Amino acid sequence: MDIRTYRATTMQEALSQVRRDLGEQAVILHTRELTGNRLLRWIPGIKQVEVTASVEVNVPSRLPAPMQEAISQETSNGQGLGCDSPFSSSSGDNPASPGELSQQLSELQSLVETLCQRSRTPSGNEIPEQLFQLFADLIESDFEETLARELVEWVRTEASGEVLNDPDQVKEVLAGLLEEEIQIGGPIRGTSGKCHTVALVGPTGVGKTTTIAKLAAQFRLREQLRVGLITVDTYRIAAVEQLRTYADIIDLPMKVVATPREMREAVQSFSHLDLVLMDTAGRSPRDEVKIQELKVFLSEADVDEVLLVLSGVASAGSLQRTAERFGSVGTDGLIVTKLDEATGLGNLFPLVRQSRLPLRYVTTGQRVPDDIETGNARRLSRLMLGMEHASFG
């Protein structure tokens, strides 16, 4: 009987080892966090998880009576385990006697029953057997382990017994629960005859300039609004030229500003337009001076909305910290980019759950004016669970 134990620093790494060695048919017999290692206890942030798995153990059967009778019959006939078995006699030339085989089988059965009993009676960090596949899927979807356990427990308390035995229904239940936690703000509301100013802010490299181009093209070409562009991103010449190229293609007026006074004058010169979209320079959330500088520019522009742009490939912790730091400039909504580049989107749930910023848009590729969608709670919840996928151009 091939029962293997794997250890790793995260549950996701351990499950990857199981799948690599035993394949997709592997059965998880037991999981636990290791706390007994004296060295690990004294290293902050370091821990280990242990996963016991096999491809030969039928855990759900819990060794029913017919199987036990079959084992007894094989033992009485002197069959079932030959000299090649790891439980056979230590001598390769002399097969084990029926009595020895019976004892070895009894020990093996006791081991399996012990592992099964642990799975039957979860305590502390144990996952209910029928929900372990959901837990594994959440880890694969980039949900942090602690959050994955919380969501599994949430489903267990909300779903009925019959639903818990159907993996597809279990995910539908969880998708509905996640959907209730996602706040949606709707698209930008440009109105003909009334100037509306929207600024996009966020760290460097999240796709603000491309997102501005997508929004500008949609409002100009599809909604026939008069749109103007302002960029404050004078730190990156390439970004200015990129936006200028889009402005020329769509035939939009554009101004580049470097001081708060120039910002005020640019906004005043565009007051006859329906919508003004403002591209700002990327700011490190740790650079308080630059954050305050951005705040001054936005104040001079007297913007109507400030939308925070974040990348879907960033870690959950980074997303939350960035949202918190940019909150000081008065962010009103959220745009999440690069969903098509993320291997999992569970990292977004803590952001939308705790920041309470309404989701306005998501982007799913580089194509302009395509690959941008208005925020939708059902869509995002299913994307996070891997039930749907972002487009790939």
Image (cartoon, rainbow, N blue to C red):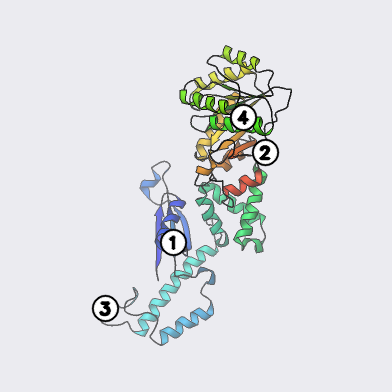
Q: Residue furthest right?
A: 193
Quickly name the residue at label 3. Answer: 92
Quickly name the residue at label 2. Answer: 184
Q: Which mark is residue 216?
A: 4
Q: Quadrant of residue 370 in the image?
A: top right
What residue is drawn where x is 64% and y is 55%? 172
Real-space Cα separation, disc 1 to disc 4, in angstroms = 54 Å
Q: Secondary structure at mark 3?
A: loop
Quickly name the residue at label 1. Answer: 52
Q: Secondary structure at mark 4?
A: helix
Residue 89 image offset from top left, x and y in percent: 30, 78
Nearer to us of marks 1 and 4 is 4
Q: Secondary structure at mark 2?
A: loop
Q: Which mark is residue 332?
A: none
Q: Nearer the viewer, residue 10 or 110?
A: 10
Could you tell me if the residues under marks 1 and 3 are in contact, i.e. CB atoms within 8 Å?
A: no
Q: Secondary structure at mark 1?
A: strand
Residue 356 image offset from top left, x and y in percent: 63, 36
Could you tell me if the residues under marks 1 and 4 are in contact, i.e. CB atoms within 8 Å?
A: no
Real-space Cα separation, disc 1 to disc 3, in angstroms = 29 Å
Q: Tell me the kind of residue under disc 4.
A: Ala
Return the disc, 1 or 2, that comes first in the chain's sequence: 1
